Image (spheres, rainbow, N blue to C red):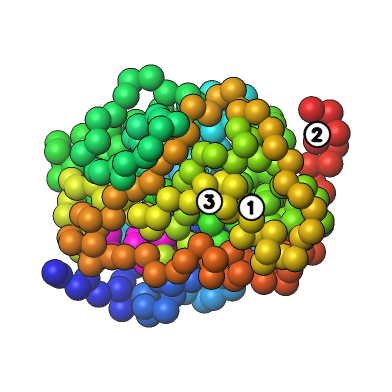
Amino acid sequence: MTQANFADARLLVVGGAGFVGSNLVRQLLEQDPREIVIVDNLLSSDISNVPDDPRVRFVLGSITDDRILRALPEDLDFAWHLACYHGNQSSIADPFADHENNTLTSLKLFDRLKDIRSLKKVVYAAAGCAVAEKTFGTATATTEDAPVSLYHDSPYSISKLIGELYGNYFWGRYGMPLVKARFQNVFGPREILGAGRWRGTVHTVWRNVTPTFIWKALNREALPLDNGGNASRDFIFVEDMARGLIACARNGKPGEVYNLASGVETTIGDLAATINQATGNPTPVDLRPARDWDHSGKRFGSTEKSRRELGFAAEVSVREGIEKTVAWTRANRATIERCMAQHAYNMARV
Ligand SMILES: NC(=O)c1ccc[n+]([C@@H]2O[C@H](COP(=O)([O-])OP(=O)(O)OC[C@H]3O[C@@H](n4cnc5c(N)ncnc54)[C@H](O)[C@@H]3O)[C@@H](O)[C@H]2O)c1
């Protein structure tokens, strides 16, 4: 395997103020790069996620902005594209905002990066949920070559696929060295509830299941279990995810797609039990019916190809990752409360 060197390299992380992006930037800083350029419009993130480091240049704005695109360095070595319109429910509430920040972003960024010949790799954050088979029966590991449906439950999911399609096009036509990383469910420090602007639904505050459950459990609230908590996901700790994204840049083959997954199936019921235990929450769970938009049921990702070709395997168990995330949440309570509070007016009206 080739070991690309980040020492003295010039790196771009689009969406680098976000949850995964800010963890990636921290790991990249350990590799002695010359500069990391972050482009982020803080639509679903908080400025406190951007590290105060002289090697980090933060550009506030949308990657669809032509002035920002033109000003990108011509000697970039690696780029990661992590911008999206977060998340499924927001995209259902406003498909046009999703298009602007989840589809147009990929098209305009790739169209610019195709001309930067110094790029060794462009890594795109794709979504495993856009590919996974919809089942409530026994799940099998979703492989990279699983068939992709033309029927999707959310504009978000469609946009994530379009990102792959545009990426493939710019790779095939212009040789842009694109590597696609298909994420399973990432959890961990720096996913800040309420970070960014109001996006039309309560899920602006209550982002993904893990930070929501941890926050409620720390406040001794009942954890809501849609569909009885039977659905399952593949939870991957964000530090593993950041390592996987670096492995994609180092060892990924242009044009290829790799799952970044733990390969472990965890039911939402088991996740809730782990979180209640880690936080000492004595309140029983709240069993509820299924959500109308989510038909994905049970799923987890195959880890075989990324293990074989990237040399990547997740290392942190759900239990260990939850304990670290609970500790981070306790230590960052004031920041989370500030981000949640900025939506109090809208939250009271939905
Ligand atoms: N977290 C997960 O479980 C998961 C699962 C599958 C895929 N992904 C993908 O991984 C990436 C990162 O997700 P995340 O969980 O860190 O979400 P996030 O919301 O924390 O990060 C997305 C970032 O993109 C920024 N952004 C939005 N529109 C932008 C624009 N027009 N220009 C520049 N920046 C813009 C946001 O402000 C935010 O900082 C996304 O592409 C997402 O689709 C995440």
Quadrant of the rendered image containing residue 78: bottom left
Residue 109 rendering spot, x and y as whole percentages:
36, 42
Describe the element under mark 3 as helix, strand or loop.
strand
Residue shown at 53%/70% (left/top)? 320
Tell me if mark 3 has few (under 14), some (14-19) or many (20+) residues whose alpha carbon lies within 10 angstroms of its own.
many
- Within 8 Å: ligand 1 and the Cβ of disc 3? yes
- Dot 1 corresponds to which residue? 272
How far is mark 2 from mark 3, CA to CA? 23 Å
- Dot 2 corresponds to which residue? 346
Residue farthest toward the top in the current orientation of the protein:
151
Q: Identify whether 151 is placed above or below 324.
A: above
Residue 291 visible from this viewpoint: yes
Q: Quick check: 147 left or right of 13? A: left
Describe the element under mark 1 as helix, strand or loop.
helix
- Dot 3 corresponds to which residue? 40
How far is mark 1 from mark 2, CA to CA? 27 Å
Residue shown at 35%/60% (left/top)? 245
User: Which segment is the magenta one?
Assistant: 241-250
- Within 8 Å: ligand 1 and the Cβ of disc 2? no
